[in-house]
Amino acid sequence: MRWDDGQRVTFDATDQDWTATRRLPQALIIGVKKGGTRALLEFLRLHPDVRAAGSEPHFFDRHYSRGLDWYMSLMPKALEGQIVMEKTPRYFVSADSPARVHAMSHEVKLIVVVRDPITRAISDYAQIASKTPGVASFESLCLQNGSGVGGMEVNSQWSPLWIGLYARHLERWLAYFPLAQVHVVHGERLVSDPAGEMARVQDFLGLERIVTDKHFYFNQTKGFPCLKKPEGSSQPHCLGLTKGRAHPQVREEVIRSLRDFYRPHNLRFYKLVGQDFGWQ
Ligand code: A3P
């Protein structure tokens, strides 16, 4: 084994190139926050041909001025034939990200995990509440005085609701990338049928279907699929406590207002991607 220039580790082998190098990613999980992005990345990591950055680089939204060399330094070394990827869910809603990603590569594959925007918003709120003691209720943040029923209307500017306007965000990406380069993962199905969703993701990435139902079991306590043997371990593993939080109860009439609010946006999204997610 040899090291050179801090970028490469070389295994001396006779008939194969075992040189692992750092490369820019060929695939990105661009969103959506609270959609199930960590689960998807952990599941993809089981694949021997995937190498993924551990934490969220936030390069295209926050750290773009640091340059591509900095970004590349965050990537794990990969062998030829392996796919390098990272996930930063903020990219999906960041105005600058599509053009910047496109400037890095016209060919990069983009993955978005989506989930019913109402459940997603409640999940987002549960995360905010866990970090901000005394935060106002979900209901009071999502409704504001206005011309709606009972003098209230949905506050579409509130970030947990705004992020769920999937069609609006996706359209910005489609100005730079063809739909064929975007794979939309069904967040609810990632929970109910992780192997099925993973088969589609592996096909999209041009990977052999190696991550299958053999890798998952449903953990009753967690209430989610967990891994029988995660990368680098022989022990079963579930995602941590920040994934699968308890959600606050939201009154039915508030949910109804949110359904009415999201309906046209959801329909537009289904049309854009050619798939009905059945959220209303
Ligand atoms: P909740 O905490 O609201 O249940 P992200 O990783 O993008 O932040 O998404 C978090 C969400 O991933 C969780 O939201 C959970 O519903 C979902 N999820 C999907 N598959 C999961 C799994 N196998 N284990 C835990 N959470 C999972």
Image (cartoon, rainbow, N blue to C red):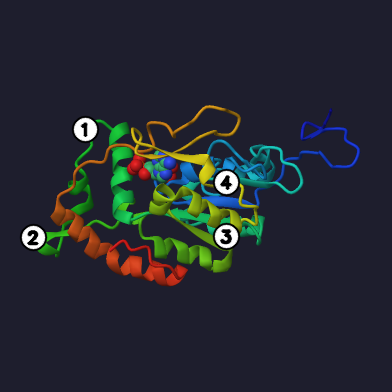
Query: Which of 58/11 is in front?
Result: 11
Name the residue that disc number 4 marks: 211
> Within 8 Å of ligand 1, the CB of disc 2?
no
In the image, what residue occupies the spot 59% across and 53% down?
202
Q: Pinpoint residue 278: horizontal percent, then vertical percent.
A: 33, 63
- On the image, numbered disc 1 is attached to which residue? 134
Any part of residue 58 in sight: no
Disc 4 or 3, which lies upstream in sequence?
A: 3
Q: Quadrant of the C terminus?
A: bottom left
Element class at badge 1: loop
Ligand 1 contact, mark 3 (Cβ < 8 Å): no
Question: Which residue corresponds to mark 2?
Answer: 150
- Amino acid, disc 4: Val
Tell me which numbered mark, 2 or 1, is placed earlier along the sequence. Answer: 1
Question: Do tag 2 and tag 3 residues touch (Cβ < 8 Å)?
Answer: no
Q: CA distance from mark 2 to mark 3?
A: 42 Å
Q: Say whether disc 1 or disc 3 marks the residue closer to the N-terminus.
A: 3
Residue plotted at (57% across, 51% down): 28
Alpha carbons under labels 4 and 3: distance apart: 32 Å
Count residues near mark 3 (Cα–Cα under 10 Å), then give few for <14, some for 14-19, many for 20+: some
Q: Quadrant of residue 148?
A: bottom left
Disc sitting over residue 79 in the figure: none
Residue 45 position in % (x across, y down): 58, 41
Q: CA distance from mark 2 to mark 1?
A: 26 Å
Q: Residue at x 53, y 55 (%)?
A: 111
Instruction: Please give the residue where the numbered disc 3 appears in the rendered image.
Output: 99
Binning the other alpha carbons within 10 Å of mark 1 as few (below 14), some (14 to 19) or many (20 upward) gives few
Q: Nearer the viewer, mark 4 or mark 3?
A: 4
Precedes in sequence: disc 2 or disc 3: 3
Determine whether label 4 and label 1 are within 8 Å by CB.
no
